[in-house]
Amino acid sequence: MRLTHLKSRVFGSGGMIFAAVAPVLTILVAFPLLFVVLQAIFPDIARGIFANPFSRFVETLFDKHLIAWTLNTLMLGGSVVLVSSLVAVPLGILRGLFRVPFAGLWDVVFLVPFTIPPYIAALGWIMALQPRGYLEQITGLNFGGFLFSFWGVVFVMTLNVFPVVYFAVSRMVSSIGGRYLEAARVAGCPPMRSFWRITLPLTTPAIAASLLLVFAMSIEEFGTPAALAARSGFLVLVTGIEQRLSDYPIDLPGASLLSVILVLIAMAAFVLQHRIVSRRDFQTVSGKPGANRAAELGVWRIPVVMFFAIIGFLGAVMPILSVVLTASTRTISGGLTADNFSTENFAEIFANSGGAMEALGTSLSLGLGAAVITGILGTMTAYVVVRQRTVSSRILDFLTLMPNTIPGVVVAVGLILAWNQPWLPVTPYNTIGVLVLAYCCLLLPYPVRYANAALRQVSVSLEDAARVAGAGGIKVFFRILMPLIFPSILAAMLLVFAVAARELVATILLAPIGTKTVALFIWRQFEQGSVGMGMAMSVMAIAITMTIPVAVAIWARKQGRLF
Amino acid sequence: MISAENSAGQTGSPVVVTGTSQRFGRNTVLEAIDLAVAPGEVVALLGPSGCGKTTLLRLLAGLSRPTTGSIHIGDQLVADASSGAFVPPERRSIGMVFQDYALWPHMTVAQNVGFPLEMQNIGRAERDARIAEALGMVGLGHVADRQPGTLSGGQQQRVALARAIVSRPRLVLFDEPLSNLDRELRESLVVDIAALLRKLGMTAVYVTHDHGEAFAIADRVAILHSGHILQIDAPEQLVGKPVSPQVVDFLKLGLVLPAEVQNGDLIIRGGKHRLSPPAGLINGSRSGDLFLPRSALRAASADGGAQKGNAISGTVVHSMFRGDGYAVQMRFDQNIAIEMFSATRLGDGTIHDLDISWDRAFWYPHDAAPALSHT
Amino acid sequence: MKSLKTVLLAGFACLALSGNAMAQSVTVYTAGPGGLIEKLAAGFKDETGIDVNVFQATTGKVMARLEAESANPVADVVISASWKTATSFAKKDMLLDYTSANAKTVPDFLKGPGYVAQGISALAIAWNPKSGTPKPADWSDLTKAEYKDLITMPDPAQSGSAYELVAALTAQPDLGWKLFEGLAANKMIVPGANAQALNPVLQGAKAVVFGAVDYIGLSQAAKGESIEVIFPKSGTVIAPRPMMILKTSSHQDEAKKFIDYVLSDAGQAMVAKTQLMPARSDVKADRPLIADLKILEVDPKTDRKAVLDRFAKTFGME
């Protein structure tokens, strides 16, 4: 039995998909990242010269800050992972196991943090909580001391990234269903203990995979720690990278080398996650379909709804409220006084509707394009990784995580280095295609992690059944596997869409000349000092970006699919 | 396959369900159920899908709360809608076998079986002994260290059974435990489970939609339909004296013919047949359902018995060879059909009369309270 | 939907269509302010019919893109916010020698072979009059107790002009590091680049920016924000914004015309309109000009790293 499965995996659909996926990933991810590594080693690679290898190593690696920054990076990544899991794992499990009132609404609300660019969210929090911020203007309280501290950074970053864990865990739990838990209860196991003994171990692969993403995202995030904690002297590796890229002389080799350190840290996390997951590989979606019934919450209804509401308020409503307030006041220094409220900023955006609408159109198209491409490619990669279990498939797996651990600006540099080589016969550089490449490269990790966790649960016999029924490898993939894991893929694609539609860091460096995206539009407003107008554009971008997830949620609901 | 030599012969607890209803929103799934199970008795809940049998089982397990009524297991009041009293499943000392087994994929077979003992804080040595005993009873001592996913369906089901009985619970619940298995395995397992339950003297409630399975395992069978218990009796009694046409229909005991009474004759709905039952069968009612058990019908040639009112003629839809004879599907009207046994093949599309033995017929009047009248 | 298709097509087909392949166009890489380059590009197009392809980002990002593209350069003209860019590009022989006829009235220290200032900004104190603090007149006023906990400053490690301010002020014999030690004792925060330093002062969390970029503050004030830009009497540093043509440019004639246009009366008027000081001394502006300011020089031999380290140490940012 085992042997035939193995054979069919290697020579059957797995092999074909591997052959399809490997070259694409090589071009998409490995090619630009190779240039990051080359840049780290050969300082003059940008001029096409392989001279003085390692000449910058000593200076960069013996930077006296390096150890402190690395430790800070680890501490930040670890803390965000910890707090995210404390918040999102319970939320996800509750959502997956119980009939939570307004469940669809929470899914949509928890997607909102993803549509808010991190620099906007951080600014929103600052404007809300700093002394004389909106909160103090309204209630007389300010939390500036908390916000501008290490834990303030962790707080804001957790609210930005926890949905990754929430969506992964809730999808996983609901596909496992409550039956294992019921069996434990009947066997005499009290609820909390069943949770620890049954639910948690079965959900571990999804939790571990999504926390890995969270870790990767938090070690590469620049804006939030820079805006909130730099003033209290808390600096991370990305701070060093950003400094090397922010003023003359630009130090590309140093920035690249620090990025390689980030990749190494991520690699360690990846190995850890791999160990956790590979020992707990359970197929809970078998060929025997059964109805999943969500349990009733009973007296816990209200506390649970409160919990969802508080997190939703903090993650989505608070930052947006602050952004909206800024957008609808004439001047920041005028504060929340009646005569300072105005729709001027929005009016100006409508006046410049050509530019703004063009930017919105470009961003939405880029988001959709990236979501579709990464959705398909990510599922195929995950399939190869889950079913094929060879060294080369594991390399593919890690390859798809790497871009997530490198600051977007360095990935962008890698893309320029790679795609602006004079010997290339054709290149997407300086076309909008390079943005598609960049978003796919940066965001591929989401669909891969989500599909990976979902595929691990699907029994091989379901595929075998389709093959016996006469379906070829590709057909099995698209007709059987894709639909089975569709809820997970859809969630990942929505995340990709939301992030791609507002990406700034890589866009600013890569945007082809003359291209306008939402993020660039907002950034230019800030650059010109029009914080209010930038915020107004953010509000509109968030609102428009959210319509697509909301439409998908409504559609999925009508289809009876889980969303 | 399953042996119960080491049984301690202890007795399970009685179960009493009183006036229990279950509603989900405006949808009533169970309506005022009364059910008493004696210690050591095995009761099967039989009915079509959606009749409420699984809901009743989940109420017994404590996996949901009743909307009205109360449930006792032994002396313990485990659920009472009026006072809100509720004992969660883990404190009911029960065992349960699930339709899809629900073996925890992250534990070995022995860990799965030992889990209920672990929950009772039973020490390692005793636990190991009892795991071995339970696995021995189901004939699976050799797979203790395997992962459940590597076992066959029948083996998984026996592991689930071992897990349900290992702690000698006072009540064992079965939720269509054999429906995923092939017929042969099902027939042998049902016999084994029945033997094991009797040996251990356990009280059990067994949900199934297969009457063969119910008759094979249960002391008494409760027929559920749309949230009501239609009849609860020993299998022989159910077949011999069904209390309503629905019971007949569900158990496929014979022909049910809705009819009007005209001058002592029965006009079968559709108007094609007129039957002349002996006086006393109808007892003054004006309409009702005539039940003709299979044993009351005998195939005759088309000799005109239909005219005399003592036979009913039908068209052969299909004959199927069954080894020792033919299963014949006959249709009498649009909605009335029966599967009969015949020693000879009857040609498809041919019309045959079935002679009626009126002494075996039942009449269920519509206009009176549904009382059984029998000649 | 149509643009989605375009995106996908572009993504898959990888069409080569780089900026310098287009005829009659010039590609300009520029640091902010954002509105300025758009106006200049539009005016230039009107006058010459030549398209301007703009890449606009912070000076750091402009430099990073230039550096990463050096195997296959795309830009024709570069406008930086840091004078240092021009001098070191010139040293590396990357610049085309060109002196615009319009540069005659640009003071000598604002031009060199191959580069010339577009406009000039200066660093100043940006003070919120609604903060309830007395109006400061000089840098050293900010070490007074009234400003405790109420000062921000752009990070010299991220902003070239902030670095120059630190370098110039610490080189003053009467000030030295004492000024910054006093600011550190007054709990001055260094929250990041220029915009991050200004924001808390606008909302009132802080009262004053030490070393704000003047034109940003002036334009905020013009928009009605409660902010006042004060040029300290002991002097400040200026940050001329150099324009240069890269030697690798394949549109050198168009590039020269562009430089000419920026230095024309019309171009300089646009510069003045953004609250920058025009490079030409004969162009008027509605703000203090170079002649009105006391300008501090930075010794080119200053050890940048040592200054930044000392600064970081002083403010506990290690």
Image (cartoon, grey):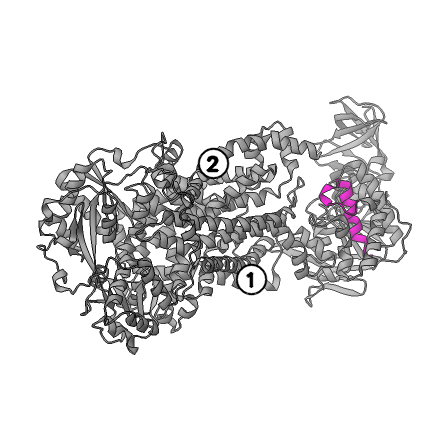
Res C180 → quadrant: bottom left
Asked if the magenta segment contains residue B153, the reply would be: yes
Residue underneath mark 1: A304
Residue C104 vs residue B330, the one in the foreground = C104
Label 1 chain ID = A
Q: Is residue B60 left or right of residue A554?
A: right
Q: CA distance from mark 2 to mark 1?
A: 45 Å
Q: x, y (%) of residue A554?
A: 48, 47
Same chain shared by disc 2 and disc 1:
yes
Query: Is label 2 in a helix, a strand or a loop?
Result: helix
Which quadrant holds the N terminus of chain A? top right
Type of amino acid under label 1? Val
* Residue C229 percent location from the top left of the image: 21, 66
Q: From where the camera sits, is residue B334 visible?
A: no
- In the drawing, does residue A112 fall left or right of residue B163? left
Instruction: Name the quadrant containing residue A302.
Output: bottom right
- Circle nearer the N terminus (2, 1): 2
Task: Tell us which disc is closer to us: 2 or 1.
Answer: 2
The magenta stretch spans residue B292: no
Residue labelled with disc 2: A26
The percent coordinates of residue B107 (x first, y second) are 71, 50
Badge 1 crowding class, 10 Å Cα cut-off, few under 14, some 14 to 19, many 20 or more, is: some
Residue extent of the magenta highlight: B143-169
Chain under disc 2: A
- Marks counted in the figure total 2
**Left or right placement of residue A228 versus residue B277 in this view:** left
* Residue visible at 59% across and 28% down in the picture: A471
The answer to whether the residues at label 2 and label 1 have Cβ atoms under 8 Å apart is no
Q: Mark on residue A127?
A: none
At label 2, which amino acid type do we have?
A: Thr
Side (left or right) of C80 relative to A504: left
Q: Secondary structure at mark 1?
A: helix
